[in-house]
Image: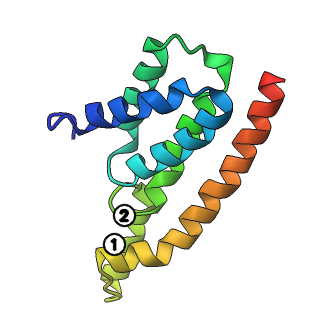
Amino acid sequence: MEQAKVLELIGERIEPIISMGPKLGGGLLLVSSALASSVTDNIPLAAVLSNILDSMGIVDDSGMWWPVISGVNLGGDLTPIDSASTLVAVTIMHKHDLLISFMGFVKKTAPFAVLHISLDGLYVLFALRHLLG
């Protein structure tokens, strides 16, 4: 992903979202980083987003780090390829001949991923409200 410049492209698309400010940008950043994390490894994505936040001069206590951390971690639950836990689940399913396609997995996990991301979004907005006054 890094050699194909996919992470760089994700970073370029997310930078305008960060510029919207912590309240609106925070929610959009959570969702966009979760979506990006569902198709790429979360550690390089977190590193790219960290570099973007640093390059924009966003300080550690600004509140913009929470959406990145949450989105990057929760986005991996949506697909069977990004999270260690989903890879383990798919391995166990195959071991017991419970075959499921990629899209079948996404269809079954999407409601739970959306619920997790939504609940975390509420938490992040609550935390940002208290951090920013």
CA neighbours of label 1 inside 10 A, class few (<14), some (14 to 19), many (20+): some
Number of other residues with Cα within 10 Å of mark 2, as a class: few under 14, some 14 to 19, many 20 or more: some
Name the quarter where the N terminus is drawn: top left
Q: Residue at x 35, y 88 (%)?
A: 98
Residue 76 image position (x, y, % from top left): 44, 55
Q: Residue at x 61, y 26 (%)?
A: 21
Q: Is residue 50 above or below residue 106?
A: above
75 lies above or below 101: above
Q: Quadrant of residue 49?
A: top left
**Disc 2 marks which amino acid?**
Leu
**Are the residues flagged by discs 2 and 1 in contact, CB closer than 8 Å?**
yes
Looking at the image, which residue is at 55% across and 63% down? 113
Q: At 65% from the left edge and 56% from the top edge, which residue is drawn?
A: 118
Say what amino acid the circle numbered 1 marks: Thr
- Tell me the SS state at disc 2: helix
* Quarter of image, res 22: top right
State the residue position of label 2. 87
Q: Which mark is residue 71?
A: none
Q: Is residue 108 left or right of residue 99?
A: right
Label annotation for residue 91: 1
Residue 3, horizontal then vertical, whole percent: 15, 34
User: Of helix, strand and loop, which one carries label 1?
Assistant: helix
